[in-house]
Amino acid sequence: MTLSSAMFDTLDEGEILGLAMDHVAAAGPYGAEAGYLTVDGALVPSRRNGQVHALAVDRRVRELAGGDGPVTVPGLPRARALGLRGHERLHGYLVVTSRSRPTEAERSLLATLVRHTAAALSAAFAHRRRREDALELYRLREERTALQGQLISVVAELGYQRALHALMADVAASGGGEEAITRALHRLTGLPALVEDRFGRLRSWTGPDRPDPYPEPDPVRQDAMLYAVGRQAGPVRVKDRLVTLVRPHGEILGVLALVDVRREADDHTLRALEDGAASLAPELAHLRNLAEVESKLHRELADDLLTGTDEASAYARSEAVGHDLHRRHYVVVVQWSNRTADGPFAQTVGRAASAVGMHSLLTRRSDHVVLVTDDRPHARALYEALARETGTRSGTIGVSAPCDSLADIPHRYQEAQRALEVRRHSRGEHYGTTFFDELGLYRILGPGNDYRELETFVHEWLGQLIDYDSRHHTAMVETLSQYFDCGGNYDETAESLAIHRSTLRYRLQRIRDISGNDLADVEDRLNLQVATRVWKIVLGEQAGERRR
């Protein structure tokens, strides 16, 4: 009974079989030759089994197929395999040898030991089965919970997809514009949604807390932001915004963003932003194509106006592009020192002109952009707008006199160029806006005049000085020009040329000797001053290059 209690106290089947094998001798003249446990339908030998007769005993036990029977063990005439049976299955075998014939009481005691071992194995098996069932039930419950979670997620995803598709259908039905996209995103996410162009200017905003006025973009920071966002896949957080680029075919056309100050955005929010950008891309691409076509029509009309064209055709084409040519127009020429006159710079000039209220036709030449605008530009507005756009103030703008007819435009274009050149070569500030009708003397020295006559005039009055400078690598003509620009003031002239006052006095005497002209004579002084102006402003380096 003590042994039986020990067997029932353990739930390990191998330990129960080991206890039986260790204590079988207590029942009589017995010894435990081998023990087996049934594991997954197969008999597995105990580690306590002897190795001498293991193969023969194993084969005989398996031949019994669940029944009891004799087992041959050399040297021991009495050996028997006793089945350890439960109510539903065979738990194993106990192979017992006997040194002598046991008494009836000893056989009864051995049978009791076998029954108690089988019962203990049944209890251990039942406990293991219950434990396995409990583990399986726990696994099934966990699996069910996971499946329920997946189902909830799928249902939520389907609900989101239905809501998104419904909103995108509304967007498509309303024309798919930028405002429709931002309205849909705001309804779907609850966050303020906005669209900016690639330069950072607001195009659409839906939701609360819109800045008023909207901050003016910084070109350098905007380019850095676009580069940083473009290097990553999907929306990117930039301060309190989630930003994604709208770039069909790789070209950035705009920015779609959600304002997420509290960082509440989830995966659905990010996906909605990406879907919104995908829906917005065709719209912006379409607007870009329309703008390019319109820009091309404007450019072609502007080109024809600058070179001269039929008035009836020009009026008809201007009506087609929505520009009124019947109003008085001005020609504006724009040149920026750090920008070539390419497509992007032309777009920059067009945006700046629109921002200051100018209605114009735009085209470009090799080194400048030309506007044919329907009103006289403000003295500083366009220049200041372009300075903000480009991030630098190193630009020059020339404005013509008013055009009373379309036939005047080619000549007015030359006037605008002259105004720009005068500003660029002026002694003072090289940058800013210059109006042709404010040029004074320079108005009669424009490109419409005969350059050959101007060169003849300059050579007549300055030819000897120019030749002297060329032979001796001096700067007599430049000295004379600065002397006149400074109003004949010795100190100011010397300072502007960075020379000593006595050096200036020596040079002026040499100029008198070389040219044969008297700087004190009113007529000579006037002609020399005009000649130096023509040499510096009108002919400049081009005339010098041709002579050389």
Image (cartoon, grey):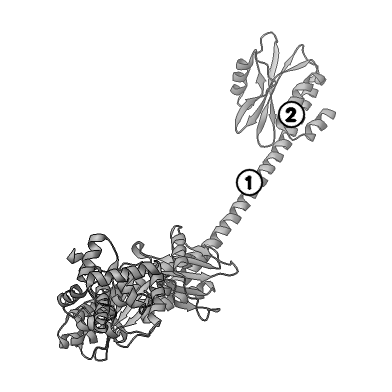
Dot 1 surroundings within 10 Å: few (below 14), some, or many (20 or more)?
few
Per the rendering, the mark at residue 136 is 1
- Residue 436: x and y in percent read 29, 84
Amino acid type shown at disc 2: Glu
Viewer-proximal residue among 363 and 116: 363
Secondary-structure class at tag 1:
helix
Tell me residue 284's x, y (percent).
Answer: 36, 72
Task: Give me the disc on residue 13.
Answer: none
The residue located at (22%, 60%) in the rendering is: 471
Q: Residue at x 50, y 64 (%)?
A: 270
Which is nearer the eye, 107 or 289?
289
Local packing at callout 2 (Cα closer than 10 Å; few below 14, some 14-19, many 20+) is some
Residue at the far top in the pictured view = 75
Of mark 1 and mark 2, the one earlier in the sequence is: 2
User: What percent of the width, then of the height, locates residue 174?
Assistant: 39, 80
Q: Residue 47, can we see it?
A: yes
Q: Nearer the viewer, residue 201 or 464?
A: 464
Residue drawn at x 38%, y 68% as measured from the top left: 502
Q: Is residue 216 left or right of residue 106?
A: left
Above or below: residue 20 compared with residue 444: above
Q: Quadrant of the C terminus?
A: bottom left
Of the numbered discs in the image, which one, if any, rests on residue 15? 2
